[in-house]
Amino acid sequence: MTQERQPGAVLQAGGRQWSFDRSVNIPTLMTLVALLAGCLGSGFGLYLSFDRRISSLEDRTNHIEKDQSEQKSDNKEQLKAINEKLDRLLYDRAGVRPETRGWTK
């Protein structure tokens, strides 16, 4: 029993022949083109949104850095004021000032 091979046919292990149609249908081609265009369009849209997101994040970080530097300078000013008050309190103790030194014994 010999079986003849036809073009485009594959001989399987049971003696059955499978025929593959190698032509491309127009609806299939249109679907693939639409799918490719959709993927490219969404990829390009994501790229543009990343650019906007990155610039937004940069603006936020610049704003946060500015606020932190202002807060740091405010803290320094407050610490200087506290230091001056402590120095004044230490100097104004009765045992340190010459005019009040006699009060403490």
Image (cartoon, helix red, strand yellow):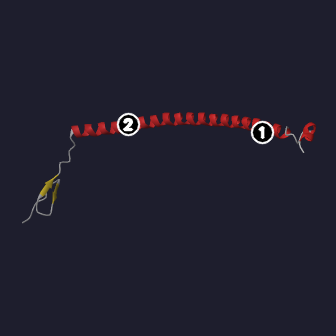
Please state which amino acid type lies under the numbered disc 1: Asn
**Residue 47 in sight here:** yes
Q: Residue reaching furthest left?
A: 1
Residue 94 horizontal/vertical position (percent): 87, 40
Q: Which residue is mark 1?
A: 83
Please state which amino acid type lies under the numbered disc 2: Ser
Mark 1 or 2: the one toward you? 1
Q: Residue reaching furthest bottom?
A: 1
Residue 12 horizontal/vertical position (percent): 15, 61
**Residue 6 in sight here:** no
Q: Quarter of the image holding residue 66?
A: top right
* Image quadrant occupied by the C terminus: top right
- Near mark 1 (Cα within 10 A), the count class, few <14, some 14-19 or many ≥20, is few
Rendered image: mark on residue 42: 2
Residue beneath the point at 69% across and 34% down: 74
Disc 2 element: helix
Disc 1 element: helix
